[in-house]
Amino acid sequence: MTARTYKTIAYVLLTVASLITVVPLLYTVSLSLQTEKEMLSAESVLWPETPQWGNYSTLFEEAPFGSFILNSLVVAGAIALSHLIFDPLVGYVFAKFDFPFKNTLFVAILATLMIPLFVRMIPLYVMMSDLGWLDSYQGLIVPFLMDGFGIFLMRQFIQPIPDDLIHAARVDGANEFTIYWRIILPQCKPALAVLGLFTFVFQWNEFLWPLVVTTSERMRTIPVGLTQFSQEQFQLWHLTAAGSVIMFVPTALLLIFSQRYFVRGIALTGLK
Amino acid sequence: MELPKRTKRTKRSPIARRQARTAYVFLAPALVFFAIFFYYPIADILNTSMLTGQRTDEFAGFDNYTNAFEDPQARNAFTVTLQFAVATTVGAIVLGMGLAVLINQKLRGSLAFKLALLVPYLTSIAVVGLMWRNILDPELGILNRILSDLGLPTQEWLNTHPVATIVAVTLWMTTGYTMILFLAGLQGIPDVYYEAAKVDGANGWQRFRRITVPLLTPTTLFVSVMAVITGLQAFGQAYIITRGGPGEASDLFVFHVFELAFRARNFGYASALSVLLLLVIVAFTLVQLRIGRDREVQH
C-alpha cells in the first residue's frame, strides 16, 4: 500500500468519525428550531422549514431556565474562582518551601484524587443536611472549592520557576505574600487560564452532586433542570434540545476565546 | 526524649523556621478543606455502612456487607456495571488508538478533526444523555424515522440492547479524549524506529504491531485504568437514558446506590455498597498498575 492510498483511507475514516460526533449535535440544533408538528411528524425532518427561534423563549416560559442558568454560572464561577485562589498558592508552597511533613501532606492531598464522588455522595449529603445547606449555593459550592488535581498541576508549573527570583525578592525585603502575588502568580497566567477553564467547564457540566443536593426547582443547575424538564415534559423534545444548545454555548465561547492560552498552557504543563 | 527534640529544633535556622511557618499559614485552609470534605467523608461512610438503615438507626456490624453478597439486585447491578466498564474500556482503547494512529499521519486539517472528535467530551452527560434518548426513541427518534424512510426495519435499541446502547453512547462521548491521550503517547515514539523497520521491509501492519502497540503500553495502561475507573462509576447514562431499565437490565451500580440512598432512604446499605464498589475500583487499579510494572520490566 502506498503512502498516498494510506493517507486517503485515513482521511475517509477520520471524516466518517468526525461526522458521527458532529452530526448528532447539529441535529440537536435543528431539533431546537423545529415546530412541534415537525418534531412529531412520522417522516424524518432533518432541518426545519422555518427556524423557530421562538422555541428558545418558550423554553423560558415553560420552566425557570433563567434561574437554572444563573445557578450554574454562580456555582461554576465560584468554584473556578476558588480554585484560582487556592490551587496556585498551595502548589507554590509544595513547589518551593521546605517544612516538616511536606511529603506526607502532599501525598495526602494527591490521594484525594482517588476518592470518587460516589464515595463522598452520602456523607456529604448528611453533612449538608446537618449544616442546613441542602438546596443552597453553599451546598452546591463548598465541597468542591479545591481539588488535588489543580494543586498538582500548579506545583508542576511553578517548580521550574528559578529560585533565584524568590531569593532576590527576599533580599529586597519583600514579604512572603508579596513574593507570591507579584512574582509567582504573574508567571502562571497560562496555567491559570487552563485551570480556570477546565474547572468552570467541568463544574458547568456536573450532574450527580447538584442532583443530590438540590430539592427545589429554583436551586437546580442547568444539567439537572434540563433533565427534570425533559422527564416532566417528555414530549417537548424540541424545547429540551433548545436547552441543550443553551447549555453548550458557554463551553464553546470559553474554548474559542481562550484557545491561545488553552493550547499554550497545555503544552507548557506537559499534559498535551 | 526531650533533649534530641530540642537540639533538632535549634538546628533549624531561623530562616528555615520562618519558611515552615509561612508554609503552614498558606496551607492551612487547604488542609482544613481536605480533612473535612475528603477524609471525614471516608470515615463517615465506613461508619454509616455499619448502621441498619438511616443514620439514626442502630449498629448493624457487617450485616449490610454480608447482605450485599446475597442481594440479587446488588449482584445484578454489579454484573451490569462490570460488563459496561469492560466494554467501554476495550472500546476506548481500540477506537482511541485507531483514531490516534490515523490522525498522526501529519494530515492537513488534523486540528479540525481533533476538535470535531473532542466536542462530545466537553459536553455534559445531561446533554449527551437527553440527546441520545431522543435520537434513539422508537417513535419520535430521528434514527428510526430515517430507517423507515429507507425502508429498513426499525429498532428499539434501548429496550433490546440497553447496555450495548449506553456503551456506544459513552464511547461516542469519550473517544476524542482517549484519542488525544494516545496521540501524546504516539508523539513520544521516535521516527527512527519506523524508518529502521521500513528499511528492514516491515509493512504497515507489522510496524503497528511490533513498534506502535508495544511502545504505547504505558499510555494503553493509563487509558485502561482511567476507563475502568470511570466506567465503574458511570451514573448519568442510567439515570438519564435508560432509567436502569428495561427492568434492571441497565441498572448501573452508582445509579442503584443513588436510588437506595435518596429514594429508599437506606443510607446504611447504600453506604456499604459504595464501600464495596470502592474496593473493586482499588483492586482493578492495583492489578492494572502491577501488569504495567511487569511489562516494563520485560522491555
Image (spheres, coloured by chain):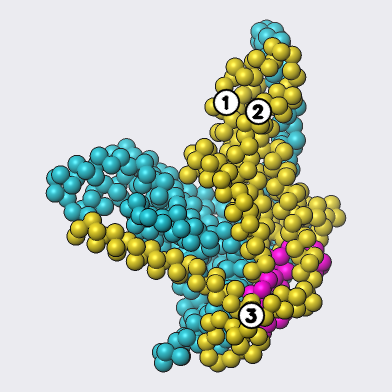
Instruction: Determine the residue positioned at 61% across, 59% down.
Output: A252
A111 over B279 or under it: above or below: above
Q: Are marks 2 and 1 in contact (CB under 8 Å)?
A: yes
Q: Which disc is residue A184 wearing?
A: 2
Amino acid at circle 3? Pro
- Looking at the rendered image, the disc whose residue lies closer to the viewer, 3 or 2, is 3
Amino acid at circle 2? Ile
Of all residues shown, which one is farthest toward the front? A50
Q: Which residue is mark 1?
A: A161
The answer to which of A97 and A130 lies nearer the viewer is: A97
Whole-percent x and y of residue B79? Answer: 49, 67
Colour in which chain A is shown?
Answer: yellow
Amino acid at circle 1? Ile
Of all residues shown, which one is farthest toward the right? A132
Colour in which chain B is shown?
Answer: cyan
Question: Which quadrant of the rendered structure holds the N terminus of chain B?
Answer: top right
Q: Main secondary structure of the magenta part?
A: helix
Dot 1 falls on a residue whose secondary structure is loop
- Looking at the rendered image, the disc whose residue lies closer to the viewer, 1 or 3, is 3
Q: Earlier in the sequence, mark 2 or mark 1?
A: 1
